[in-house]
Amino acid sequence: MSPMQKESAYLHLPTYTAGIFFHIGNFLAIAVYLLFTLAVIFNFQIPIESTTNLIVMILAAIIFIAAVCGLALFIKRLAKKELRDLSCADDYISNLLCTIMLFLTTYSLLTLQFGAAYYVIMALLFVWMPLGKIKHVLYFFFARYHLGFFYGWRGTWPPKKAIQYDK
């Protein structure tokens, strides 16, 4: 759905944009974690040359921007009474875990040292994932696949234009 069609998005475009960057950064950070963990498990070297070093720097920059966006969203949630009233502990824990993970991933990419703090936060994040609101990371792709597979074959997706009835 276009952000211009959603009141919660077009009235708060900076927050909406920060949320998009935050989600992209989390996706990239989890991909980095999986890549480097698989490299350790299967004992293969990831070549860090001038080309890949540029890629690592770009990844680190994107993930850092996402971390700053996550921190800004966290501060906004703390600062605005309306958001505080709507928030529960899960909102704070999920945002904080993801934001710390993004900062640690940025640091780890820049130093190419994935230390104990990085792996502890990643472990906490993966333990929290099925329990908290960030469980959508686990089921998002499966839900998208199911939606396309189930509705796509019936000719009902994408939805047709709504019928307007006269009152």
Image: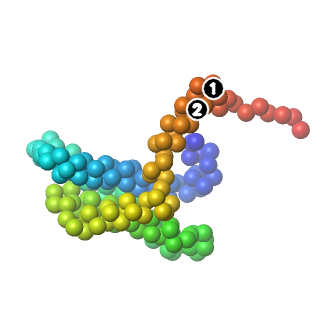
Is the residue 52 above or below the residue 87 in the image?
above
Q: Judging from the image, what secondary structure is the residue with disc 2 in?
A: helix
Q: Which mark is residue 150?
A: 2
29 and 75: which is toward the camera? 29
Rendered-image quadrant of the N terminus: top right
Q: Is the residue marked by circle 2 packed among few (<14), some (14-19), or many (20+) residues within 10 Å?
A: few
Residue 103: x and y, percent?
Answer: 30, 63
Residue 128: x and y, percent?
Answer: 42, 64
122 and 105: which is toward the camera? 122
- For residue 72, say whether it is visible: no
Residue 33: x and y, percent?
Answer: 27, 53
Name the outermost residue toward the right. 167
Residue displayed at 16% across by 57% down: 112
Residue displayed at 37% across by 60% down: 126
Give the quarter of the image for residue 122. bottom left
Which residue was labeled with disc 1? 154
* Residue type, mark 1 in image: Arg
In the image: residue 133, left or right of residue 156 = left
